[in-house]
Image: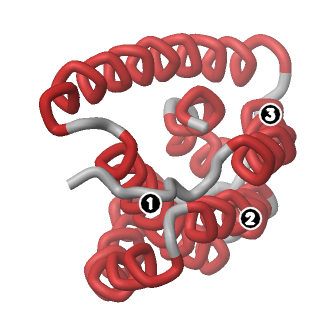
Amino acid sequence: MMFAVSCVQVIQALYARDVLLIPESIWWIVFIPLFLSMLIVSMPIGKFVDKAGRKTPLLLSVLLQVPTVLLFLYGNFTRVLISMALLGVVVLLSNSAGSAMQTDLVPKEKRGKIIGFTNCVGYIMTAIGMLLGNWLYVSVSRQLPLYLLLASIVPQFLITWLLIHEPRIREQ
């Protein structure tokens, strides 16, 4: 997920300016719904993750990427605002459930090492994704990074659905 998302993050403002024709002078406004949605739903999502388990919120975060990306891909200013609000929900669902799952599965004495390793791999994938996203945007097609993110949703969903299971015993 981090790889595909980073392909888009690096070109998001350029795409909004060059393709969606959103003026640079008002680009900052699209971040207001992102942070407002995160502020409003952070506690309910945290409770949802505790109640529903980890897998359901992870699957929901993957599924919510579809309207989030489509609203941005074929957006105007209003659709981009809605897309960013949905992005806040996607980020909270995936981060909350992912962090809770890591805590559930990894013994206390190894959490620092595992989280450090996970972050390292994530940052490497993010860097590669940003390089690829920029190259695709500049050299191939402005929409291709967004299509790549859409295409990644299927394997993300299948991997989460088939390979991730709720732990029988949660680590304390």
Q: Amino acid at mark 1?
A: Ala
Alpha-carbon span between mark 2 and mark 3:
15 Å
Q: Which mark is residue 122?
A: none
SS for dot 3: helix
| Discs 3/1, front | 1
Label 3–label 1 contact, CB within 8 A:
no
Label 2–label 3 contact, CB within 8 A:
no
Alpha-carbon span between mark 1 and mark 2:
14 Å
SS for dot 1: helix
Q: Amino acid at mark 3?
A: Leu
Residue at left offset 63%, top offset 52%:
165
Coordinates of residue 159 in the picture (x, y in percent): 76, 40
Residue 8, by quadrant, is top right
Residue at left offset 65%, top offset 32%:
4
Residue at left offset 37%, top offset 44%:
102
Coordinates of residue 104 in the picture (x, y in percent): 35, 51
SS for dot 2: helix
Coordinates of residue 85 in the picture (x, y in percent): 49, 75
Position of 128 with respect to 105 (left or right) is: right
Residue 112, by quadrant, is top left
* Depth check, front residue: 49 or 140: 49
Residue at left offset 53%, top offset 33%:
2
| Discs 1/2, front | 1
In which quadrant will I find the N terminus? top right
Alpha-carbon span between mark 3 and mark 1:
24 Å
The numbered mark, 2 or 3, whose residue comes first in the sequence reads 2
Q: Which residue is mark 1?
A: 97
Q: Which residue is mark 2?
A: 63
The numbered mark, 3 or 1, whose residue comes first in the sequence reads 1
Q: Which residue is mark 3?
A: 148
Residue density around tag 3, few if under 14, some if 14–19, many if 20 or more, within 10 Å: some
